Image (tube, grey):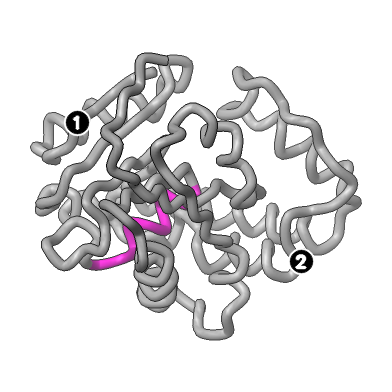
Amino acid sequence: EGIRMSPTRYRFVTLHGCLGAPSDWEVLQSVVPAADWHGVDLWDVMSDPGASRWESVGRLLRLRLVEAAAGSRGPSILVAYSFGARLALSVPDLGSTGSPFAGVVLVSCHPGLPEHDEAERAARTVSDGEWARRFIEEPVSRIWAAWDTQPVLRASATPPRTDHLPAPRATLARAMRVASLASQPDFRGRLRAWSRPLLWVTGSRDAKYTAMSADLARLGVPARFVVC
């Protein structure tokens, strides 16, 4: 509501969340008719044999982002949510003058656990390992039910669920192991050095992530912080 954009066409390159898909962004396309949209399928990235650790995921994802931004009639803007936003931070030059994007929007993004927080990293290793097991072993209906009852999602409307998962089970399990928050680097230093336009968005019901964004603002991360 109230969005106005110039006649210049923009391209929004989008990254979906965990258990999401590029089609998740279709609901917004009618809201921003001056833009064209290009969704990157993160499950294709995570299924690549080279996606074995955070650094290699960043390199592979950058190739996809450069390709997605190419050929736009105007500036390209990256819009990434949750899991996709965390993966975006693994692209080393995303916030520098070498970035293929005129600006970046990160929604519900975790910058990474502090390096010294060994207890939380250990707990997340166990939690994400359990999700990886579920993705391999449990019925689809049980996976969706468990996913939608997580505390961070309880305040949100649950979208209609299908009888299938957005990617092969092995790919989902691999993503939980390779791109776990437990092994994610602490990207706060990278964010403090950010030199491109950055919009950081959280939801008002998401107390944890909204508090985290306030901490980033206090650290001097040069972003515009918005709570919806």
Mark linked to residue 224: 1
Drawn side of residue 182 relative to residue 227, left or right:
right
Which residue is labeled 2 in the image? 168
Local crowd at mark 2 within 10 Å, few (<14), some, or many (≥20)? some
Which structural element holds mark 1?
strand
Left or right relative to 191: residue 52: right
The reply to whether the magenta stretch includes residue 88 is: yes
Between 126 and 156, the residue placed more toward the observer is 156
Image quarter in which the N terminus is found = top left
Q: Is residue 182 left or right of residue 106?
A: right
Label 1 vs 2, first from the N-terminus: 2
Type of residue at label 2?
A: Pro
**Residue plotted at (10% across, 51% down):** 195
Answer above or below: position of 173 versus 144: below
Query: Which three-letter amino acid code belongs to the residue tagged 1?
Result: Arg
- In the image, 124 versus 181, the foreground residue is 181
Identify the magenta region. Answer: 83-92
Mark 2 secondary-structure assignment: loop
**Residue at 32% from the left image edge and 49% from the top image edge:** 77
Magenta-colored stretch includes residue 19: no
